[in-house]
């Protein structure tokens, strides 16, 4: 790593000889190179060689190679060290930790190092902006500050021109659109961590699933949602999921657009009807009983009010990649407070957004900043009861979407909530406090400790003692290596730490240029209408056929009665030819009409049936 400075009052500690300034971040002097470099302590008369330490008379201490420069009233660490005013030289382990978070390029400031009970504002904990697409995890018990950490990271991403997507499950993240409120707690925290706090709001777009709750309606078609994701929200087992895949295949092959749930219900109902049973044999492997289970699941799902989430106009996920006119990244907030009782639905819907982005975005490789960072709150809801196919899809998406410039942060309570295959892809970790009130809690705590690199901290004890807004952090450095584990007191968000006022949120939604595009649902012709039209045509054909049959029967009865009454008269008309009698009879004319009508109808039904199967 090259020499680097710190900014914003923090300390930049570079590996291999970076110079650190305790105030502005500018270099104080040339840093020593190598372990055997000589150093001089101005006005102190102390000199250290290699890793040795000599006390500087009455002033401080200077070390070489990881060293410190003596000054009156304190100690300054140079070449990878940290200054702690009035506290003496930091232990070697603390200096190494601070050096690991030195960043030469753009970075997000998370907070200040905690060591031996003290907060060290000159030892800033930072994450390189270019590493945000290596994904991450924000975890911790309820009430430990996960939401505020999410807000803090989102603010700085936006300030650096990176668009952000986040889910607002409790309704308190919407405040990111408004400037924060100054107060003693904010001022105190800012002073502790060396933060120049300023109240700021950030550009936001608010969405709501299906228009339920405040926000621009966000919908997806059933076809694009796909059988794997839909099986998750319908809570189908593996066999039923595979059967649903066959139903989607049938609809695609027949040109039956599945835009909303009534389209899917119509296709399934058709396949279990007397008319459609033959179609089941064509696609194979789908039993009538399984189709019936799927149909009942869809109906129950609709009765829960989920029908509003599916339909048109379908949301274009490219909207999430926009910047505000001032160059800041747009923060897309999905308001979920009104549907928080449907966790499987909204968590799976978030996966659809990711899958759609993955499908549409080109490969871009490693960028200096992500194209989008996606926060996946309450991630445990996503993985609970997930099928093998679903987990495989998630794992593949997380693994591959990095190269398309998208970073994903999962937010949950413990790392155990995330499958190992997914957890292995998360390079950045912010772990808030954990509680160990029960044996299961203690087991989860020990499991969490094992997921961190080796560190000088007693993590099992530390994780139970962290306060609100404090966390254990390890991220990827600029060269892609894990940074040392750092106990950190986090910065305070600059935006409002609470809900955005309802009236202002509503005005922001209706004033958005996207509102007119997505607000009104559209119900165009699709599978439901096509199948309904086909069934109506068949019903009319059956009625017409029944009417023709009745007319034939009536004609036969009439001819029989007339023939009996004219038996004697018929003998007197021997000169009339038999052919003339038959052709001229009403029965013949009725039969001719009936045969012609039935023949034409058979041709029409055949063509209609073939056309219907092709659509």
Image (cartoon, rainbow, N blue to C red):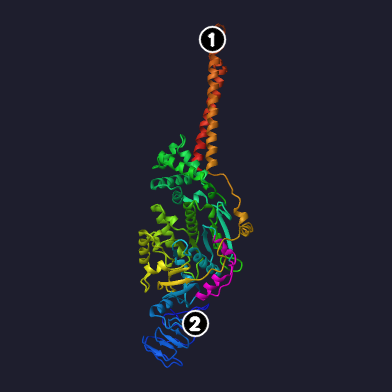
Q: Which residues are magenta?
A: 172-201
Q: Quadrant of residue 39?
A: bottom left
Q: Quadrant of residue 540?
A: top right
Q: Quadrant of the N terminus?
A: bottom left
Residue 290 - label: none
Labels 1, 2: front one: 2
| Label 2: which secondary element | loop
Per the image, the residue denoted by label 2 is 22
Per the image, the residue denoted by label 1 is 564
The foreground one among 100 and 518 is 100
Query: Closer to the N terminus: mark 1 or mark 2?
Result: 2
| Label 1 neighbour load within 10 Å: few <14, some 14-19, many 20+ | few
Q: Position of residue 448 (x, y in %)?
A: 38, 64
Q: Position of residue 370 (x, y in %)?
A: 50, 67
> Would you place residue 168 above or below residue 285 in this image?
below
- Marks 1/2: CA distance? 124 Å
The reply to whether residue 191 is in sight is yes
Q: Position of residue 143 (x, y in %)?
A: 47, 62
Tell me the residue at 57%/18% (across/down): 586
Q: Position of residue 608 (x, y in %)?
A: 52, 37
The reply to whether residue 574 is in sight is no
> Would you place residue 519 above or below residue 571 in this image?
below
| Label 1: which secondary element | helix
| The magenta stretch spans residue 239 | no
Tell me the residue at 47%/74% (across/down): 112
| Label 2 neighbour load within 10 Å: few <14, some 14-19, many 20+ | many
| The magenta stretch spans residue 198 | yes
The image shows a total of numbered marks equal to 2
> Would you place residue 431 above or below residue 222 in this image?
below
């Amino acid at each position: 790593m090259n020499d680097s400075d710190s900014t914003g009052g923090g300390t930049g500690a570079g590996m291999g000889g970076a110079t650190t300034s305790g105030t502005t971040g500018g270099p104080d002097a040339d840093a020593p190179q190598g372990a055997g470099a000589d150093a001089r302590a101005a006005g102190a008369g102390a000199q250290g060689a290699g890793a040795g330490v000599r006390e500087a008379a009455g002033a401080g201490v200077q070390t070489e190679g990881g060293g410190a420069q003596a000054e009156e009233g304190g100690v300054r660490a140079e070449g990878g060290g940290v200054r702690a005013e009035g506290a003496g030289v930091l232990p070697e382990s603390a200096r190494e930790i601070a050096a690991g978070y030195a960043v030469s390029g753009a970075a997000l400031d998370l907070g200040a190092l905690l060591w031996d009970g003290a907060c060290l504002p000159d030892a800033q904990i930072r994450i390189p902006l270019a590493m945000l697409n290596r994904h991450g995890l924000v975890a911790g018990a309820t009430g430990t500050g996960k939401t505020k950490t999410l807000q803090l990271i989102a603010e700085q991403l936006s300030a650096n021109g990176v668009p952000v997507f986040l889910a607002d499950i409790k309704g308190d993240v919407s405040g990111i659109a408004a400037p924060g409120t100054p107060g003693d707690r904010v001022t105190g925290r800012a002073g502790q961590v060396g933060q120049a706090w300023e109240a700021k709001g950030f550009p936001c777009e608010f969405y709501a699933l299906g228009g339920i709750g405040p926000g621009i309606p966000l919908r997806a078609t059933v076809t694009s949602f796909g059988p794997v994701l839909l099986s998750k929200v319908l809570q189908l087992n593996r066999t039923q999921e595979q059967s649903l895949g066959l139903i989607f295949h049938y609809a695609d092959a027949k040109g039956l657009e599945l835009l909303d749930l009534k389209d899917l219900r119509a296709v399934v109902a058709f396949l279990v009807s007397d008319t459609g049973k033959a179609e089941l044999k064509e696609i194979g492997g789908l039993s009538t009983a399984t189709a019936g289970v799927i149909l009942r699941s869809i109906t129950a799902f609709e009765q829960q009010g989920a029908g509003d989430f599916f339909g048109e106009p379908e949301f274009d996920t490219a909207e999430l990649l926009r910047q505000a006119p001032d160059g800041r990244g747009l923060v897309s907030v999905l308001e979920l407070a009104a549907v928080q009782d449907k966790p499987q639905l909204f968590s799976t819907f978030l996966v659809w957004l990711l899958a759609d982005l993955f499908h549409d975005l080109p490969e871009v490789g490693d960028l200096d900043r992500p194209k989008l960072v996606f926060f996946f709150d309450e991630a445990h809801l996503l993985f609970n009861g997930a099928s093998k196919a679903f987990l495989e899809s998630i794992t593949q998406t997380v693994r591959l979407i990095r190269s398309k410039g998208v970073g994903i942060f999962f937010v949950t309570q413990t790392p155990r909530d995330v499958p190992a295959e997914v957890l292995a892809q998360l390079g950045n970790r912010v772990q808030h406090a954990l509680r160990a009130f029960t044996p299961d809690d203690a087991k989860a705590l020990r499991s969490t400790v094992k997921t961190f690199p080796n560190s000088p901290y007693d993590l099992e004890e530390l994780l139970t003692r962290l306060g609100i807004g404090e966390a254990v952090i390890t991220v990827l450095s600029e060269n892609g290596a894990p940074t040392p584990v750092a106990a950190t007191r986090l910065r305070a968000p600059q935006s409002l730490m609470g809900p955005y006022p309802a009236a202002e949120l509503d005005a922001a939604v209706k004033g958005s240029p996207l509102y007119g595009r997505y607000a009104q649902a559209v119900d165009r012709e699709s599978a439901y209408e096509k199948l309904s039209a086909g069934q109506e045509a068949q019903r009319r054909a059956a009625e017409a056929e029944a009417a023709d049959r009745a007319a034939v029967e009536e004609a036969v009865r009439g001819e029989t009665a007339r023939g009996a009454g004219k038996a004697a008269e018929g003998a007197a008309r021997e000169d009339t030819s038999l052919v003339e009698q038959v052709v001229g009879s009403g029965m013949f004319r009725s039969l001719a009409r009936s045969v012609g009508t039935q023949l034409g109808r058979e041709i029409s039904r055949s063509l209609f049936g073939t056309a219907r199967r092709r659509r």
